[in-house]
Image (tube, coloured by chain):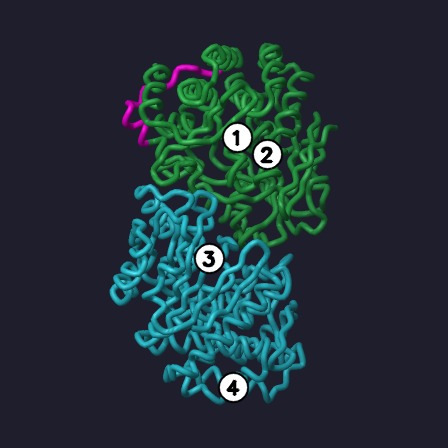
Chain colours: A cyan, B green
Amino acid sequence: MNVVDVAVPGARYPIRIAPGRLDCLDEAIPADATAIGLVTNPTVASLYAERAERALARTGRKVVRIELPDGEEHKDWRTLNQIFDALLSNGFDRRSVLVALGGGVIGDMTGFAAAVYMRGIRFVQVPTTLLAQVDSSVGGKTGVNHPLGKNMVGAFHQPVAVEIDTDVLATLPAREVSAGLAEVIKYGMILDAGFWAWCEEHATSLRALDRRVLGHAIQVSCELKAKVVAQDERESGLRAILNLGHTFGHAIESGLGYGAWLHGEAVGCGMVQAAELSAEVAGFPVADVARVRKLVEAIGCPTTAPDLGAERWMALMRVDKKAEGGEIRFVLTPRIGQAITRAAPEDAVRRVLARTVG
Amino acid sequence: MNVVDVAVPGARYPIRIAPGRLDCLDEAIPADATAIGLVTNPTVASLYAERAERALARTGRKVVRIELPDGEEHKDWRTLNQIFDALLSNGFDRRSVLVALGGGVIGDMTGFAAAVYMRGIRFVQVPTTLLAQVDSSVGGKTGVNHPLGKNMVGAFHQPVAVEIDTDVLATLPAREVSAGLAEVIKYGMILDAGFWAWCEEHATSLRALDRRVLGHAIQVSCELKAKVVAQDERESGLRAILNLGHTFGHAIESGLGYGAWLHGEAVGCGMVQAAELSAEVAGFPVADVARVRKLVEAIGCPTTAPDLGAERWMALMRVDKKAEGGEIRFVLTPRIGQAITRAAPEDAVRRVLARTVG
């Protein structure tokens, strides 16, 4: 078993990575827990909920299953309230624990419910998509969407443990594998040129879910993310670089309606756009733009952005959480393995849109 | 001007107490604020919003007024979303600041909106009721109600400043003055027998809003609360004693429907019930139960609890946030000026209900 430690001010927790972790979830539950809420969706539940419940039942605590509707379009207040209804009607107190069994949507909503239920209870992340395993389950960002913007309402709330069962990826649809790989290669692009080159070399094995190769990719991704989060939990500086491709990506998701594209697909395409913008304003080599496009393609993500109309694109990017005083801020990369955050001139952004929108 | 300092891990802020603070609100806004949202309700707005806006305008920042419907029955998700709608449609970013101008409901909702908007922005408390000035605006508890329980969804989020203008109490209805005084005498009952005796002596002047007497009561209350919060921000122990009378009180509010009784009225009555229960199980002198009833009456709060039916009373108290593993926990007082938290036997609770319900 591989263990990656995450440490932020006031919290420290392990990410445990191994095949079969699903059958050991009781190990993640604190000894003084009074009850356990297993939050999941029907798709994941049909595959894994019973195994998870069997493991959790070994704690001797009451385990209540809370099934939420599947999909990013349900990541809102209404669905969140389903969790509160279930917790309150089952008498869950401040020492109860939630377990998020699912992808990023389940993890973000469960984490946010834990952050605000009775002003904060504990929770465990059990990510079942590649994207959630390498990104959203680590670092304590939680939240729900608002009709005017993604993740606009949320909290920083760290889990007490992250349990990554690499076996569950076998049932993941190919599109979700590609979406998860977008976040994997992102770590290389912003932090580690060597890992980027390794991803270029292993793109085919990664898509084919080669167990050894994928296990390495997950571990390196978690390590790189943990390092960033340890330095800047609240995204007052460094952590923002993890949003490479996200300003464009969020506009795609929001503009097409949440759920049309997977988050990772939007980020993959957004990385190509960020590379183009970096070439415009941050000295990123034009030849490397082609490398980025090629790897995003190789992992199976779209590289042509949807035509939302230039004005709509600009308006959607202006509500991004990184925006400050009306300026749109982007994560840019001067070269592969490095990242900076800064505002970009509007005309450069418009040129990139003209080149990347299909 | 009197200033009380509040210090918790990671946050430190002043409570400024003086007549006329409303005209100096610009002093509370951090220099790097990008925009200001003034959250209030129509009742308070008609009296004070323009003065507040004039002061805030001196910062040179955009000031957006957000008026929420008045009353505890609107302290819910739906109303909270009105704040998010206003912030997002006005382009409020992570460096914007909210100002809560109103009573406890406005303060709790504004604070919670600030806690979760873009995962946390800053806010200033400008409490306009006595209850909010001596209690809810200090200490960072924020939240909204759920149909199954009061303040069940919320966060700990400290303001950057609390501005208490003692002049605004002149327009406060007598019922709200009494409700606020319930929290004032509560501090004496749990922490300071001398202050309790002083309240007994000055009950008439307090109700009459004698400026000098009331100013002293506000300052002592803030000092006592700040001291408790500094030791235990997250209510893992000591802070729970501030909830004297609240387990009974929350049941009254929830059982009658939020808004029927004022929060302070429910707490006042709940203190009489807590005194009775303390006499049953914590050695509280029976003679002092009469003292408590007399002072609660003297400040103008009800001392007879509403008849919700014994089973409903028990069920409502079981969903209290202090409940753990199904046991109802109460704040009890062995003698005036001291408090403890503990579970009480159900038969003792039922005897108290039989004696105190009208």
**In this view, the mark in front (2 or 4):** 2
Mark 4: which amino acid?
Answer: Trp
Q: Name the residue under label 4.
A: A198
Please provide percent x and percent y for residue B5. 69, 36
Mark 2: which amino acid?
Answer: Val
Mark 1: which amino acid?
Answer: Leu
Quarter of the view holding residue A168? bottom left
Q: How far apart are marks 4 and 1 (CA)?
A: 58 Å
The answer to whether A204 appears left or right of B133 in the picture is left
Q: Are marks 2 and 1 in contact (CB under 8 Å)?
A: yes
Q: Name the residue under label 3.
A: A160
Q: Give the range drawn in magenta.
A: B301-315
Please provide percent x and percent y for residue A215. 43, 78
Mark 3: which amino acid?
Answer: Val
Q: Dot 4 lies on which element?
A: helix
Q: Quadrant of the N terminus of chain A?
A: bottom left
**In this view, the mark in front (4 or 3):** 3
Q: Name the residue under label 2.
A: B228
For residue B308: magenta? yes
Q: Are marks 3 and 2 in contact (CB under 8 Å)?
A: no
Q: Mark 2 lies on which chain?
A: B
Question: Is residue A117 positioned above or below B198 on the image?
Answer: below
